[in-house]
Image: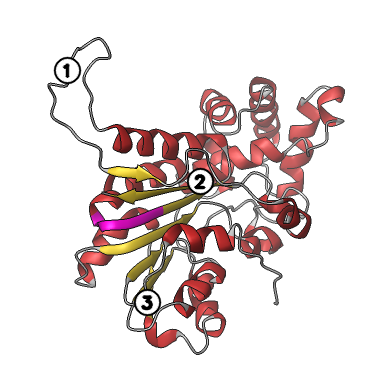
Amino acid sequence: MEYTHKSVLLQECLDGLNIKPDGIYVDGTLGRAGHSREIAKRLTSGRLIGIDRDAAALEAAPARLEGLMDRVTLVRGNFSQVGEILRKLDIPAVDGMLFDLGVSSPQLDEAARGFSYLQDAPLDMRMDQSAALTAYEVVNEWSQEELKRILWQYGEERYAGPIAAAIVRHRAQAPVRTTLELADLIRSAMPAKACREKQHPAKRSFQAIRIAVNDELGEVERMLNTALDLLNPGGRLAIISFHSLEDRLVKTAYAGWAKGCTCPPDFPVCVCGKTPKVRLVGKKPIVSTPQELEENPRARSAKLRVAEKL
């Protein structure tokens, strides 16, 4: 199956990474290799490490990277494991890392993957199809309180309580098996005015369940705990986030690294001795241009933040 795929903030990522032809770079979320292809094109004696947990992405990558594979190493794994992956490759540090935290277009577009509330499929939502936990287990086995928590915390869904209650009532009679069944159930639990809003009534809940299935926020936290130590001085870390929860984690980590000092604000002088670890490349996140949004509406919520290691 052929997919139309547009890499989000492509030129902005390339500019942010400040690619050196002989450098070593990591694309921690390979996807359809759009970013990877453009990074690899700019390398001569350098190397790109492309990581993805989705076997389908790795199978498709050589064709997408045709003519460039001599400078690319593909690895199956989660981007949170980047430290372990680089150790196995005997690479102590790299010159830049890119992480695109969004769900790849093929995963959304392929109905059978179960990410979409617009196409019917078994409840799945796994980015790594060898993983044990699926959306079916979350929806049919997690407690009402836990469902309410993830819908509110991960989806910022204001009707989390009624939706969780509706799911539990329904599954007491029969399991919720498919994406459209779940979407209809979510819609039925919401007031009519909420169903008339511009965005699909199931969007926030599907996002929340997907985040829970793939432990997306945990993966981001683990990556942030290791990424900075894996950069050479002058190396760049570029992260694209698509919702406020991810962006908050990234923004907070970057701010802490850039500040350095952890002394209370009322201390007259610094006594902790901590110094800044990074320079922020731009004070505000980079967002898509009107032209990109016209060509790729999925880029609407994308925010790119770049930091350079001192």
Residue 218 drawn above or below residue 150: below
What amino acid is labelled 2 in the image? Answer: Val
Residue that appears at 75% across and 44% down: 181
Left or right, residue 234 beside residue 212: left
Secondary structure of the residue carrying numbered label 2:
helix
**C-alpha span from label 2 to label 1:** 46 Å
**C-alpha span from label 3 to label 1:** 43 Å
What amino acid is labelled 1 in the image? Answer: Val
Where in the figure is residue 52, as x and y percent of width and height?
44, 65
The residue identified by callout 1 is 269
The residue identified by callout 3 is 21
CB-based contact (under 8 Å), mark 3 and mark 1:
no
Dot 1 surroundings within 10 Å: few (below 14), some, or many (20 or more)?
few
Left or right, residue 112 beside residue 226: right
Where in the figure is residue 287, as x and y percent of width and height?
61, 47
Checking the image for residue 115, the label placed there is none
The residue mark sitting in front, 2 or 3, is 3
Q: What secondary structure is the stretch in magenta mostly built from?
A: strand
* Residue 279 part of the magenta-drawn span: no
